[in-house]
Image: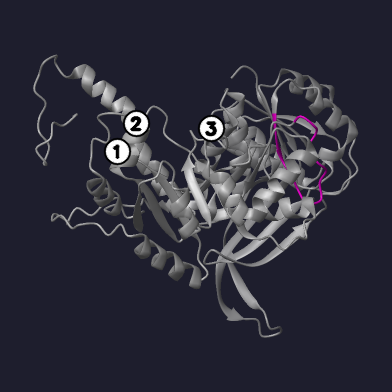
Amino acid sequence: MNGPLVIVGDTILDRDIDGTAHRVSPDAPALVLDEQHTAERPGGAGLAALLAARDGVDVILVTAITDDPAGARLTKLLTTEGIQLCVIPASGHTPEKIRLRADDQVLLRLDRGSTARTLGPLPAAAQRALQAAAGVLVSDYGGGIAQEPAVRAAISTTRAGIVWDPHPRGPAPVPGTRLATPNQHEARHHTGNTTSVSGLAAVIQDGDALRRRWNVQAVAVTIGAAGAVLCQGDPVPLIVPTEPARVRDTRGAGDRFAATAAIALSRGALITEAVEHAVSDATRYVADERCRPQIGNAETTTYVAPNTDLANAQQLADGVRARGGTVAATGGCFDLLHTGHIATLNAARRLGDCLIVCLNSDTSVANLKGPGRPVISQHDRAAMLLALRCVDAVVIFNERTPIPTLNQLRPDIWVKGGDYTATGMSEAQHLQRWGEQAVTVPYLSGRSTTTILTRAHRTNPAGAEPEADGHGRPSAL
């Protein structure tokens, strides 16, 4: 990362007043808050700058700070963290958000000042900073900075990749922005979409529409606890789910997401990698405890013949739909189950209320992979998949593709690892005909059955007799 991360946007002073509320005022129907503690911190673009600085990044914040007590407090909070300020002169009063809280519950929010202020000229130092930046983050909070012509002109001439975190009251990103990061409600506001499409399909529709309308490279629509949808013009978008977590406080999650994405891109990450990092950091930011899904059941020691009937999976899917749930499905050979498979399966399960795996039969695998494959028989592969808590049903199919099985199951969403593309996923167009959606999820590079088998054969001494597996056949490992 050569050069600073320059953050441009509206800064707010956030103040939390915490106390106890055990009585009602005798002169009004209102709770009485006994103040115990007050905490102040920068909000808006100031919070994004604070988070980036605490990540060890050299940060320059271009913002408007009014010459008043709240502005002086903001300046001190920011500079104490090592953030370099390029202040745009502003009239009026510094915006403040004051929350009165009891037992971590907000009782009342008091807003002071106004984000809509008269701004002075852009300092020359800000223009120089944008020219030397390794990355630029525009953190728009509707205060007018992002729509100032001089500011937009200076941002447009930077050679750094731009991440734009928009606001409903703010303007569109400058053309050529590398990544825009609206949340689901902001995306719908900016598109003005009034169609009857809802759910994931609506998010994808809005993200694609904004990417074209704004003339940006990519749009990552954040969808709260579900993660983010990345639209880059590919017919099959990338969904990055979150890890399960107990949420402490969602305030600032969007700033954490945008700041992480901007930092990652400034360090040379791909957009997909930046969004993955951003989802992970935002999840940790709002959680007080990580809840990791457990894989498998260590207490199960006896082999049970797996139920791989299509009728069984169909019954599961019908039951989930009857309850208003989402049926997710994925498919593959899953020969020599590895961590790449586990990552994809866990991600796929988080996108639906059940996960059905369409498993290539032994005949199908042999036709696809050639002699010597599969290494593991279809029933053993099915049993291992069903031992995973993220898998609810397995259906074995004999064809080269699972399309005939999908014609019966009609899942709401078809999920594959991110190494697949729309051109390499024949199922995508079939799901579109049904009005359903195909997506990819992040995958672990360098993990594949072929790679594992190649490595095993290299390490096996020439002429050595391989160990037999449980069926008396020579084992490849």
Tell me the number on the disc at residue 273. Answer: 3
Residue 162 image point, x, y percent = 71, 30
By secondary structure, the bulk of the magenta-drawn segment is best described as loop
Residue located beneath label 2 in the image: 369
In front: label 2 or label 3? 2
Q: Is residue 423 visible?
A: yes
Residue 125 percent location from the top left of the image: 79, 22
- Magenta-span inclusion, residue 172: yes
Q: CA distance from mark 2 to mark 3?
A: 30 Å
For discs 2 and 1, the disc positioned in front in the rendered view: 2
Q: Residue at point 76% right, 39% down?
A: 212
- Which dot, 1 or 3, sits closer to the camera? 1
Q: How many numbered markers are drawn?
A: 3
Comparing 270 with 402, the one in front is 402
Q: Where 368 sits versus 106, above or below?
A: above
Which numbered disc, 2 or 1, marks the residue that appears first in the sequence? 1
Question: Position of 420 compared to 82: left or right?
Answer: left
Q: CA distance from mark 1 to mark 3?
A: 27 Å
**Does residue 344 belong to the magenta stretch?**
no
* Amino acid type, label 2: Lys
Q: Is residue 184 left or right of residue 169?
A: left
Residue 31's place in the image compared with 133, above or below, is below
Which residue is drawn at the image coordinates 40% and 68% (left, top)? 315
CA distance separating discs 2 and 1: 11 Å
Contact between marks 2 and 1 (CB within 8 A): the answer is yes
Ranked by sequence position, the earlier of labels 1 and 3 is 3
In this picture, which residue range is highlighted in magenta? 162-176
First in residue order: circle 2 vs circle 3? 3
